[in-house]
Amino acid sequence: MPGDLYYDPFDFGIDIRAHEVWRRMREEAPLYRNDKHNFYALTRYDDVLACLLDPETYISSYGTTLDLMSDEVFPLPMFIFRDPPEHTLLRKLVSRAFTPRKIDGLETRIERVCAGLLDPLDGMSTFDFVERFSSLVPPTVILALLGFPEGMESEMRASVDNTMAIDETTAATGSRSVIEGENIGSVVFELIPELCAERRAEPADDLITVLATHERELEDGSTRPLTDDEIMGYVALIAGAGSETVARMLAWGVVLLADHPEQLRELGANEGLIPNAIEEILRYEAPSPVQGRRVTNDVELHGETVPAGANVLLINGSGNRDERHFPDADRFDIHRDIDRHLSFGYGAHFCIGGALARLEGRIGLEQMVRRFGTWDVDHEALDWVHTSTVRGYKSVPLTV
Ligand code: HEM
């Protein structure tokens, strides 16, 4: 392995120029080894896909991000950190809330959510897209999925407003939307037991009803309802997995399209191109680009033995740029024929919210294109988030 090739998911500088590093890893060290943080990494499309499809060898129960991976089984009751057969059972329960019919049923509500966030921006020439839009859409949509009545978002924001001190930035800009977005979480958690009780008395067609009325089967054949902790675990996983990622996807979308203005104009002229544009945005910049696994037994990879118990990072964000699978992979092209990108993972842990994310992406972009036509990004002022699960922008100043 070349001595100057170094990949470290905790290094912010590397995170920003990740594609350059991943390209070298694909070519020069397809099985990469990092001694400092004690992990292996796979970057080629075929390798990443094969491991994602083998959850018996590449397991998730010891954590799936490097900072969380340890020799102990991950303690929180979340199915993303479980392996089959337990994972299969836990996932099956909520998959009822993610059927195509359920997700399509959210379309008009998502349209209203997006319009409600964009209306106050009419007449403004510059705003932060993440702060004013992309970070607020997903938590609001998850409230809808859970079954919170429409209109409650603003009620909750108001209650947060009343109890919150105004900081300097808020006072200067008059905007506190991100702060509100973050606080919705805690208010929601307080309300969930109440909502569960309501749904047990009067079931509805939503995720809280699924969780509140489920009877978990025990080994002796008897059943019991989910505990409050189990319900919270589900809600926390879905809210966590479905918020940061969608916020990043939308932000990548507006930046990539600003960088390719001819393609942005094409979307304006033909909205039918938007769904494929979303796939290309997801392929080109995976919002969740690294999935960690632990190997259960010795495996041979690229002529080396990876020992049982080792941590392996599957870099799906790199697989999406592998020339072996996607010709001219570094070219952004909304017309690209994409058979399958790896941005939602694959196999047992394939993103359960993929259809919802795609719907949010489509509606978000449609409304941006209809309302503003084109836009420019102030590249100098772009700011990044650095977390172990997502890669992308914290701040995207747009001029419309
Ligand atoms: C663009 C947006 C999104 C991206 C890029 C994304 C990405 C991913 C990826 C890569 C995985 C696989 C993790 C692994 O293999 O360990 C995953 C799993 C998951 N995602 Fe998403 N996701 C997105 C949106 C959502 C949404 C909207 C929800 C829910 C509302 C959601 C809920 C989940 C859950 C619950 C899992 C765990 C599935 C399992 O372990 O069986 N995600 N997501």
Image (spheres, rainbow, N blue to C red):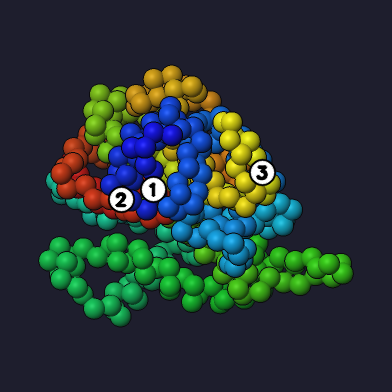
Q: Is residue 161 left or right of residue 101?
A: left
Crowd around label 2: few <14 · some 14–19 · many ≥20 (10 Å) = some
For disc 2, the marked residue is: 12
Task: Tell me the CA gap for discs 3 and 2.
Answer: 32 Å
Q: Is residue 329 left or right of residue 172?
A: right
Query: Is residue 367 visible in the rendered structure shown here?
Result: no
| Residue 357 to residue 164: above or below | above
Mark 1 or mark 3: whose residue is earlier in sequence: 1
- Horizontal and vertical percent for residue 87? 68, 55
| Residue 8 image label | 1
Residue drawn at (43%, 19%), measured in percent from left and top?
327
- Horizontal and vertical percent for residue 272? 41, 27
Residue drawn at (80%, 68%), measured in percent from left and top?
218
- Type of residue at label 1? Asp
The quadrant holding residue 285 is top left
Q: Secondary structure at mark 3?
A: loop
The label nearer to you, 1 versus 3, is 3
The label nearer to you, 1 versus 2, is 1
Mark 3 or mark 2: whose residue is earlier in sequence: 2
Q: Secondary structure at mark 2?
A: helix
- Type of residue at label 3? Asp
| Residue 182 to residue 314: above or below | below
Residue drawn at (54%, 46%), measured in percent from left and top?
312
Q: Is residue 10 left or right of residue 58?
A: left
Task: Tell me the CA gap for discs 1 and 3.
Answer: 24 Å
Where's the C terminus, which quadrant?
top left
For disc 3, the marked residue is: 298
